[in-house]
Amino acid sequence: MSKPSKPNSNQGNFLFADLIDQLNPKHPLLQLAKQIDWCVFEDEFSPLYSHLGKPSKHIRLMVGLSILKHMENLSDEVLVQRWVQNPYYQAFTGEVEFQWQFPCDPSSMTNFRKRIGAEGYEKVLAVSIALHQEKIAEDEMCIDTTVQEKNITFPTDAKQYRKIHQQLLKIARKENISLSRTYEKEVKKLKLHTRFSSHPKNRQRARKAVKRLKTIGGRLLREIQRKMTLEQLEHYHERFALYLHLLFQKRGDKNKVYSLHEPHVYCMSKGKAHQRYEFGTKASITTTRDSGIIIGALGFERNVFDGHTVPDVLAQVKRLLGYVPATGIADRGYRGKSKVNDTQIVTPKPARKNASKDAMALARKRFRRRAGIEPVIGHLKSDHRLKRNFLKGFIGDQINLIMAAAAFNFKKWMREVIFWLIKLLSIKNEPGMKFHHHNMMFA
């Protein structure tokens, strides 16, 4: 795909534009569009395109759609439909006239994510942080981890064995391999036997059915391997190794596979009463202590101890801010790490007997402010698509997390703009106060 051409006009020059003339210039989305430096994305992402082939979509359009996707919690398909209906979405992405057609195919969003990667989306997060200007200049930050669940079914042995059976039959038909037996009818009956396996009357029958499903999967795999050529075996080597890993893993094993299409997913227990286990990847969130702006969002491919995530987290904060705050406030999950490089890691601990009242008051204030990161994580999950990740692979986990954090920062800036407008209106309505309409403009 060739390098995209620049739009005919920028957001700030709409003297004769029909679209902007009919929109409210005080709308927070338009104010946000004016504040974002879109040239940063043009300079960063233009080298990733070729000069040959079909012209691609404008970089501002694709970045704007990515921001709107997570700010409004929409899928790719719904986003392009809403874009046609919403003139503010179109103005935000740089359109000068109202469009009646989709901005792009939903699959173009996937291609754009692959093109710029997690490093490219970190630039979007950096821009969202820079919007808040002096509010990010704090010496203390709050660090916490959460689980970014993957869009997979709850893993059970019976489900995994049936999936192996289905995929092996699909491979056999694709490669024209004749099987002595397909076991399709038997697998259907065994599926019914595995239902309600926790009931005492069904427990023994379900256990036998799961064992039989495992046997069927192993038989089919060995038969297909025997009848394949060397080239075919080499082509399917990774998939067959994954099937073998899943067939022979046991309950207490480490590095277990919980999903065939997302094998990097792992199991985490966060001590929640309503949800004992979660399947996905660990995500670290870093915010400023007082203003609550997200200054770091990092995913981890392995389920590592929270304290061991700190060096990578601080490295990302330095990339985004240019410096690292002197103090990081964390919960007891980070015990054992008191200092990383020049940053002090503070965790709750019993006060010393000779501690002064000022020191105890400072510690109490710090950990009360640290608790403020919990609702931030809640908003990321409920409002910005962090609850369940639908993007493929670990790179999808990273992109979804980074863009959720960027969307939170953008939305926070927009809420402050709305709050300022309400404050201006309240001042205007006070008796004895004269306030001219032409002064009601946003900063």
Image (cartoon, helix red, strand yellow):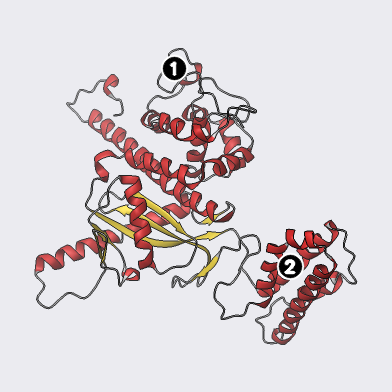
Which quarter of the rendered picture does the C terminus lie within?
top left
Would residue 375 be visible to someone looking at this image? Answer: no
| Quadrant of res 239 | bottom right
Toward the viewer: 337 or 88? 337
What amino acid is found at the position of numbered circle 1 in the picture? Phe
Q: Exactly how many numbered labels are in the figure?
A: 2
**Contact? badges 2 and 1 (CB < 8 Å):** no
- Relative horizontal placement of residue 239, taking residue 180 as reference (left or right): left
Say above or below: 404 vs 58: below
Where does residue 368 sit, x and y in percent of width and height?
25, 62
Where does residue 173 sit, x and y in percent of width and height?
85, 59
Residue count near mark 1 (Cα–Cα under 10 Å), binned few <14, some 14–19, many ≥20:
some
Toward the viewer: 65 or 51? 51
Which residue is at a point 85% across and 72% down the rendered structure image? 183
| Quadrant of res 154 | bottom right
Which residue is at a point 57% across and 51% down the rendered structure image? 391
- Relative horizontal placement of residue 101, taking residue 368 as reference (left or right): right
Residue at mark 2 to residue at mark 1: CA–CA distance? 58 Å
Residue 164, numbered circle: 2
Disc 2 or 1, which lies upstream in sequence? 1
Disc 2 is placed on an element classified as: helix
Where does residue 91 sit, x and y in percent of width and height?
48, 26
What amino acid is found at the position of numbered circle 2 in the picture? Ile
Q: Which residue is mark 1?
A: 14
Say above or below: 255 vs 77: below
Residue that sits furthest to the top in the current view: 16
Residue count near mark 2 (Cα–Cα under 10 Å), binned few <14, some 14–19, many ≥20:
many
Say above or below: 369 vs 350: above
- Relative horizontal placement of residue 129, taking residue 181 as reference (left or right): left
